[in-house]
Image (cartoon, coloured by chain):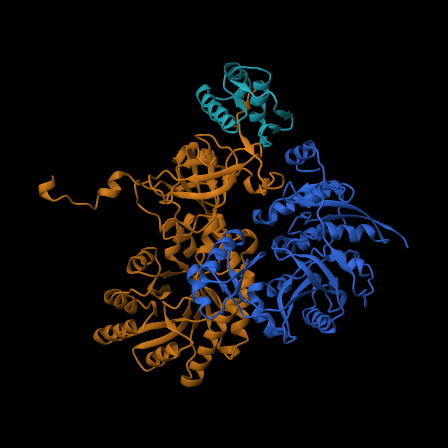
């Protein structure tokens, strides 16, 4: 799973998809996940990073990460490998 | 003349196809020799064009929609005031006026002036109250009734002849030629602006308007009459000309002196074929075509600023007849970074 | 190093007209405490969902209402509207503050009596009083507010047969310039029905004509309507004085004062548009004082204000059960508070806040209750922060009608607690169990 590389990310939580013209806002955790994806990290890497940083149960993290990933897909921001 | 530095908060930067009055109000203030104004835009939508017109609007902040409640609005104004030291705010939307009127004394305590109608003045001129208003002040108004449900609407329509005007509580009006059309507009308008929806007798004739400014003591500080020359499919004037019509100005004086109206107002009138003037609406704020008044010699925004700041203002007594305004649209080129900054930080 | 609190990652597509998160913070700010007690702790202790009432807010509301009227008018009596909330503990707070009871059924009447209210401090309203209820109320000296001619004749018959006298008033309906016009309760003013009823009452020696009552509607957003109602009742009172030389003891203005909830379909927030007690009081008292009634004969004003006194004293706290993405892209939250507990969600856009901090980013959300029924929608659309499963929220201003109109539907009802003025908590109604529901059921032998 890879982030569509043409996507423009500004660090304040705004992303722009040049292919579709859609703009999005993200919250801090959303931004973090997208940045990690953009830098080529895998979902497992991301899980590891977030578990280390946040007080969160692995099951819950997995649940919402999966949710978020499907939102990214729904908005054409992720490329299936 | 001494040029006074002021910071003015202004809403209504949506100069789109159904424009808000913010930009022409800003032009009036910027052109005034009495003021050196820094303009602080207060915007609801990220795409209000005025936000990006940096030569007119020095800085813009996003503010919460009126439906979020006046407390949220007040908190935001405090934040903005802490950074911009506002001298006054000119709200330009009908739908936000209620909140600003309710907040008037709180805002005043911050040291920010406004120049608004009283709550009583604001309420009694509501479209839904127009028949009572007509009776009270002895002016002609079309027959109108309020509908709170589709059932109501069909009862009301029995006493009207088609076409009828179907109007939203704050904005938007449609002409309906059948009960089915009226119903469709009712649903649309109630979803957008809440209840009631107003059903008004359709009066045929020429649409004429007056822009005016009352000082709150019964005096007319400014009044300019205009005939719409080109009306868009949204019912907005796209071109108009100042006219010399004594009866329109007399009507304006009558209303302002009787109600002691405070602030800007617009009278939407119809002159029928038998030469009677009907009041269709009394808008409790400056209309979007205000710059025509400035161009015709009455800088109404400047006068409003002076009244708000407690300065002395001499009433305008004349204006140039035959001045026209022709509206045009203009495509600005904006980088998405500006948009992104506005969206994420709430200011630009 | 302490780990950070995890907020569900969210992404929101920007669309025109979407509210900016900047400045709307106050509306969705977390509410962590009620009366200084942490909501999360209360849920932990008493279970979720949970009804929470604040005794101090109730007492303060009563005091505010009383003050608004007593500074303008000499005689004012509040009668607690039982149907708004008849949990005994709640009623008793009102009675301790001097409120009478306003009841609309034999059941409510008996509840008021059990709460120690004597008949002569009970106002008995409603269109459906039975013969037995009328007799009891007459004997105990309650104020019987007659709703229609059939009741007037029935009460006359009861009084005659049992040789008792009854203290009576009539309910009057009228046009006060508002929508909808309530004409189903009481006698009409404009068509002379009310005057006719008064004449019949005055002609019956077993009736003591005590007062005039109106209840112009519910959730009245304009104080002006009360001014019109009060002046019409005052005209009737003056006419009675002129014709019979009889001075009524009270004018009962009923209820209908709005709380600060936002009605569905309203554009502006109820917090901004609801008139204050002072505005209502000014309209009512000035209409009576300026009427033809002689100053030394001014009747008492009775107020049956229910909603505006109790709504903001009650909240419901609950928990997120699940989050979903609907096919149209909107976020859905399934929570453990359904319309069975929050009947008022059918007509209010209830204020809902999370009990924990969030980043400020909100997304369009539908909030569903837990019932397996399509009608179970708490908020069809609002901008809401991304709550996770198990996180808590609190719905404000739920104190009126929800503990009387609630439904025993699909599931049992939870605990109701009261936080007293010393911040001590008390369960005032235990969570139901299956036994509390089935105890009245009977099974025929052949099904055993």
Against C444, is C231 above or below? below
Q: Is residue C441 left or right of residue C202?
A: left
User: Looking at this view, is C401 or B196 the one in front?
Assistant: B196
- Location of residue B334 (image quadrant): top right
Q: Which chain is blue?
A: B
Observer able to see residue C254: no
Q: Position of residue C242 (x, y in %)?
A: 45, 84
Which color has been applied to chain C in this rendered view?
Answer: orange
Residue sitting at 40 percent across and 46 percent down? C342
For the question of whether residue C230 can be seen, the reply is yes
Is C359 drawn above or below residue C58 in the view shown?
A: above
The outermost residue toward the left is: C446
**Viewer-closest of C382 and A8:** A8
> In the displayed structure, does residue B12 sit left or right of residue B186?
right
Q: Quadrant of residue C21?
A: top right
Query: x, y (%) of residue C64?
Result: 53, 57
Q: Colour of chain A?
A: cyan
């Amino acid at each position: 799973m890879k982030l569509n590389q043409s996507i423009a990310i500004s660090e304040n939580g705004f992303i722009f998809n040049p292919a579709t013209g859609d703009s999005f806002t993200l919250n801090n955790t959303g931004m973090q996940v997208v940045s990690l994806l953009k830098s080529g990290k895998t979902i497992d890497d991301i899980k590891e990073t977030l578990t280390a940083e946040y007080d969160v149960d692995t099951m819950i993290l997995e649940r919402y990460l999966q949710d978020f990933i499907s939102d990214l897909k729904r908005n054409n921001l992720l490329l299936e490998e | 003349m001494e040029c006074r530095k002021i910071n003015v908060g202004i809403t209504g930067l949506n100069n789109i196809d159904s424009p808000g009055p913010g930009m022409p109000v800003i032009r009036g203030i910027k052109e005034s020799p009495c003021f050196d104004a820094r303009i602080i835009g207060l915007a609801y939508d990220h795409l209000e064009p005025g936000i990006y017109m940096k030569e007119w609007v020095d800085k813009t902040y996003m503010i919460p929609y009126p439906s979020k409640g006046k407390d949220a609005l007040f908190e935001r104004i405090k934040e903005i005031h802490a950074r911009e030291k506002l001298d006054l705010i000119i709200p330009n939307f009908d739908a936000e006026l209620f909140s600003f009127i309710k907040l008037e004394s709180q805002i005043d305590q911050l040291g920010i002036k406004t120049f608004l109608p009283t709550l009583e003045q604001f309420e009694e001129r509501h479209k839904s109250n127009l028949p009572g208003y007509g009776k009270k002040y002895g002016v002609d108004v079309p027959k109108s009734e309020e509908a709170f449900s589709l059932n109501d609407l069909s009862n009301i329509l029995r006493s009207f002849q088609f076409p009828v005007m179907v109007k939203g509580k704050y904005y938007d009006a449609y002409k309906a030629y059948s009960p089915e059309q009226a119903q469709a507009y009712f649903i649309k308008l109630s979803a957008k602006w809440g209840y009631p929806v107003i059903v008004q007798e359709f009066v045929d004739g020429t649409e004429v308007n007056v822009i005016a400014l009352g000082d709150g003591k019964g005096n007319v500080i400014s009044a300019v009459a205009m005939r719409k020359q080109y009306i868009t499919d949204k019912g907005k004037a796209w071109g108009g000309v100042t006219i010399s019509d004594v009866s329109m100005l007399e009507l304006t004086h009558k209303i302002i002196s009787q109600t002691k109206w405070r602030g800007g107002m617009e009278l939407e009138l119809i002159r029928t074929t038998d030469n009677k003037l009907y009041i269709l609406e009394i808008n409790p704020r400056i209309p979007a075509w205000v710059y025509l008044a400035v161009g015709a010699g009455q800088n109404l925004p400047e006068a409003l600023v002076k009244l708000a700041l407690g300065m002395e203002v001499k009433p305008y007594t004349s204006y140039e007849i035959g001045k026209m305004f022709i509206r045009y649209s203009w495509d600005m080129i904006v980088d998405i970074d500006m948009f992104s900054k506005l969206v994420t930080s709430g200011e630009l | 190093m302490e780990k950070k609190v995890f907020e569900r990652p969210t992404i929101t597509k920007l669309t025109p007209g979407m509210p900016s998160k900047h400045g709307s913070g106050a509306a969705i700010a977390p509410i962590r405490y009620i009366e200084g007690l942490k909501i999360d702790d209360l849920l932990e202790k008493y279970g979720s969902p949970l009804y929470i009432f604040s005794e101090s807010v109730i007492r303060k509301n009563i005091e505010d209402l009383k003050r608004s009227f007593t500074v303008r008018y000499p005689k004012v009596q509040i009668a607690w509207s039982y149907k708004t909330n008849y949990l005994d503990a709640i009623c008793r707070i009102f009675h301790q503050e001097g409120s009478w009871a306003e009841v609309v059924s034999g059941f409510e009447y008996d509840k008021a009596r059990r709460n120690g209210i004597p008949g002569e401090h009970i106002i008995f309203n409603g269109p459906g009083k039975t013969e037995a209820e009328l007799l009891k109320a007459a004997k105990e000296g309650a104020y019987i507010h007659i709703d229609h001619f059939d009741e007037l004749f029935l009460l006359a018959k009861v009084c005659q047969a049992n040789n008792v006298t009854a203290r009576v008033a009539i309910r009057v309906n009228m046009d006060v310039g508002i929508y909808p016009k309530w004409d189903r309760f009481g006698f009409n003013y404009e068509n002379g029905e009310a005057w006719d009823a008064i004449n019949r009452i005055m002609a019956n020696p077993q009736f003591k004509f005590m007062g005039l009552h109106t209840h112009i509607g519910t959730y009245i957003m304009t104080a002006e309507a009360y001014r019109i109602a009060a002046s019409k009742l005052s005209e009737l009172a003056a006419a009675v004085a002129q014709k019979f030389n009889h001075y009524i003891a009270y004018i009962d203005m009923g209820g209908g004062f709005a709380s600060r909830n936002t009605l569905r379909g309203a554009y502006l927030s109820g917090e901004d548009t609801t008139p204050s007690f002072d505005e209502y009081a000014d309209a009512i008292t000035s209409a009576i004082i300026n009427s033809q009634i002689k100053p030394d004969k001014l009747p008492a004003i009775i107020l049956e204000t229910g909603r505006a006194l109790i709504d903001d004293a009650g909240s419901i706290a609950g928990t997120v059960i699940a989050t979903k993405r609907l096919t149209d892209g909107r976020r859905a939250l399934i929570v453990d508070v359904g319309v069975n507990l929050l009947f008022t969600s059918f007509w209010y856009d209830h204020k809902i806040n999370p009990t924990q901090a969030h980043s400020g980013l909100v997304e369009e959300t539908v909030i569903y209750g837990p019932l397996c029924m399509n009608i179970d929608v708490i908020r069809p659309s609002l901008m809401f922060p991304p709550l996770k499963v198990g996180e808590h929220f609190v719905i404000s201003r739920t104190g009126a009608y929800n503990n009387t109109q609630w439904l025993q539907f699909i599931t049992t009802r939870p605990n109701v607690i009261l936080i007293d003025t010393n911040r001590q908590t008390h369960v005032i109604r235990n969570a139901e169990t299956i036994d509390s529901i089935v105890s009245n059921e009977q099974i025929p032998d052949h099904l055993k």
